[in-house]
Image (tube, coloured by chain):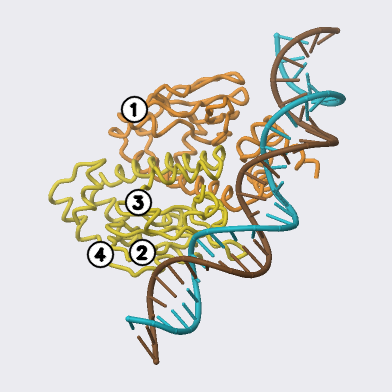
Chain colours: A yellow, B orange, C brown, D cyan
Amino acid sequence: MEGLFENFAKHILLSTEEKSTIESAFQQKEVVKGALLLEAGQVCRHIYFVKAGCLRTYYLDESGDEKNVILHPEDWWAGDLASFSQQRKSKYHIAALERTELYFIDCDQLEQLFRDVPKLERFFRILFQNGIAFYQNRLLSMLSRSAEERFRIFRSVYPHLEQRIAQKHIASLLGMTPVFLSILRKR
Amino acid sequence: MEGLFENFAKHILLSTEEKSTIESAFQQKEVVKGALLLEAGQVCRHIYFVKAGCLRTYYLDESGDEKNVILHPEDWWAGDLASFSQQRKSKYHIAALERTELYFIDCDQLEQLFRDVPKLERFFRILFQNGIAFYQNRLLSMLSRSAEERFRIFRSVYPHLEQRIAQKHIASLLGMTPVFLSILRKR
DNA sequence: CGTCTATTTGAATGTACTCAAAAGCGGTGG
DNA sequence: CCACCGCTTTTGAGTACATTCAAATAGACG
């Protein structure tokens, strides 16, 4: 679980005992491309950490269109926090865009883990704090950038992801149609 | 500081001692309409809680246009968390849209308060968790809703705010021009 | 009351979309 | 290994939603 602990180490310092407490709470799994980890309408029961591969969180709208809200490549966390913490039905689906290796934890066990290793409250407080900054940025880019600029930003932020995943998923993430993204790429 | 403690009570239970520790860490002030609480380029040194009135967080882009990222009416928190926690220059300005009554805390004192009242880590973890859900929603609405739908949503989420603040600020928040919002309102 | 800023209105324009069809690509099975 | 099927991407034509610019009107505030 190296990748996971490196991630924790970004914000908190864990003792060996704390690490082993955490290690025993997390599980590991590998899912195939297309696998569904959370379905809208269900309560989110797990938080995932992506070791390798890529997940996406998306909204399935009234007309059946999928809107990718966020991609989770390696070293990212995934899970519907609002659903998780308020035990409400999720609005989002979470699925794998590639064969993906994951660590995950059950939501009840995470609550227990918060009690056993209180430092984790701090870790997630900071993680979520950064999450807010991330979404503020995304929102700002929707408010003030053209489709072309948003695509340029995407390319610079995720240099290799463009080759790994379908254009339609990038288009959806950036709030444009795949047809229009294809036109932009030709330029 | 009733409003503030009611807000804390949404997620954590505080003892009388804890309340008084918190109370002595927060300060109070009142600002006039238009007052600037945070300027882009400066490091965010305070977190604000809006008792009455309304603040806005906005981005001033290259061409001098202001983009409202979020409004903070009564009972909301404000402050650039990313700047605050990483001690980096803020990208955003925070200003008052009305005469506004505030509670605020210095960032160093908040760090101290996290040590004195560890429950607050939990409070802010949950607050930020909800913040992420809020921004996900905003983002989704930019990704999948028309300007008209976004305006309808705004009206239902903030029923009285439309009368209190300038249309151009609502237009900016919703990612459209004030001219177009005026056309929408006529319909 | 006068000035300054915000809103409304109209015309022309542009960015991005829809629809449809063709081409490309990837995986599967014969 | 190749052929076929399904899905994704490309291309083109026509369209719509929202913008820009400019001018007129209304409203806020000292």
Give amino acid for label 2: Glu
Q: Are marks 1 and 4 in contact (CB under 8 Å)?
A: no
Q: Could you give the CA–CA distance between mark 1 and mark 3, rounded to whole angstroms?
A: 30 Å
Residue at x 35% of width, y 34% of height? B18
Q: Residues within 10 Å of mark 1 (few under 14, many from 20)?
A: some
Q: Locate residue B176 relative to residue A60 in the image: left or right.
A: right
Q: Are marks 2 and 1 in contact (CB under 8 Å)?
A: no
One can see residue B157 in this view: yes
Helix, strand, or loop for circle 4? strand
Q: Are marks 2 and 1 on the same chain?
A: no
Give amino acid for label 1: Gln
Question: Residue A62 in the image: x percent, y percent?
Answer: 62, 63
Residue that numbered label 4 is attached to: A28
Residue that numbered label 1 is attached to: B87
Q: Could you give the CA–CA distance between mark 1 and mark 4, rounded to whole angstroms?
A: 35 Å
Question: Residue D21 in the image: x percent, y percent?
Answer: 72, 28
Question: Residue B44 in the image: x percent, y percent?
Answer: 41, 25
Furthest-left residue in this view: A16
Residue that numbered label 2 is attached to: A98
Q: Chain of mark 1?
A: B
Among numbered discs 4 and 2, the one appearing first in the sequence: 4
Q: Residues within 10 Å of mark 3 (few under 14, many from 20)?
A: few
Helix, strand, or loop for circle 3? loop
Q: Could you give the CA–CA distance between mark 2 and mark 1, rounded to whole angstroms?
A: 36 Å
Residue that numbered label 3 is attached to: A160
Q: Chain of mark 2?
A: A
Q: Locate residue B46 relative to residue D10 in the image: left or right.
A: left
